[in-house]
């Protein structure tokens, strides 16, 4: 996997080009010289972790032939107060919608993602206490 990050020499804006050829922007907070034009790098790290685990959960449920129709993960994180300001606590709240989905089935998919498949969560789990909550909605 590869990525190239380019500074735009105007504040603290950066453009990333991923190995798969996609582009995304990052920027800093105004107090750090940024212009608040794009997400912060740590926000992208948190969002990427949410995307990684959501992908796993949906895939696990679909492979189990469960009728999942929607999956949302709301993440909240605390960071260390001093540098390096790593994540220290992360909560992932899953809201999964489907037809005849059992809470236990969704919890099992979340556990599989957390303990076996989500490389992003497993990496962040080295510095952060990661907790999971979920709710299942019929539909």
Image: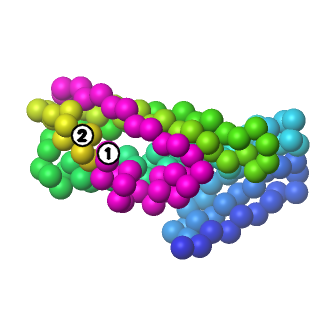
Q: Is 39 left, or right, of 83 in this rendering?
A: left
Residue 68 in view, yes or no: no
Q: Mark 1 points at which residue?
A: 110
Q: Quadrant of residue 1?
A: bottom right
From this view, report whether residue 62 is shown above or below residue 102.
Answer: below
Locate residue 69, reporting x and y percent.
23, 38
From this view, report whether residue 90 is shown above or below residue 125.
Answer: above
Q: What element carries label 2?
A: helix
Locate residue 80, reporting x and y percent.
71, 41
* Range shown magenta: 110-139
Q: Mark 2 points at which residue?
A: 106
Toward the bottom, the furthest residue is 1
Q: Which mark is residue 123?
A: none
Locate residue 95, reporting x and y percent.
33, 31
Q: Is 132 left, or right, of 77 in this rendering?
A: left
Q: Is 36 left, or right, of 114 in this rendering?
A: right
Quarter of the image with the C terminus in it: top left
Q: Which residue is drawn at 41% across and 56% down?
A: 118
Locate residue 63, reporting x and y percent.
18, 55
Q: In which quarter of the image is residue 3?
A: bottom right
Q: What element carries label 1?
A: helix
Q: Nearer the viewer, residue 116 or 21?
A: 116
Residue 8 in magenta stretch = no
Q: How crowded is mark 1: few (under 14 residues within 10 Å), some or many (20 or more)?
A: many
Marks 2,1: beta carbons within 8 A: yes
Q: Which residue is drawn at 37% across and 55% down?
A: 115
Q: Residue at x 62, y 35 (%)?
A: 78
How far apart are labels 2 and 1 at the CA level? Answer: 6 Å
Q: Nearer the viewer, residue 20 or 68?
A: 68
Residue 123 in magenta stretch = yes
């Amino acid at each position: 996997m590869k990525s190239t990050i380019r500074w735009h020499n105007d504040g603290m804006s950066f453009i990333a080009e991923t190995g798969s050829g996609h582009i995304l922007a990052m920027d800093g907070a105004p107090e750090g010289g940024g212009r608040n034009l794009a997400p912060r790098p740590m926000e992208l790290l948190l969002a990427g972790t949410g995307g990684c685990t959501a992908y796993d959960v949906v895939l696990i449920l679909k492979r189990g032939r469960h009728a999942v129709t929607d999956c949302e993960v709301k993440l909240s994180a605390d960071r260390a107060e001093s540098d390096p300001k790593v994540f220290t606590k992360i909560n992932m709240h899953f809201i999964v919608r489907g037809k005849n989905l059992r809470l236990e089935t969704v919890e099992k998919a979340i556990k599989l993602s957390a303990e076996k498949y989500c490389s992003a969560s497993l990496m962040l789990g080295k510095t952060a206490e990661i907790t999971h909550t979920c709710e299942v909605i019929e539909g």
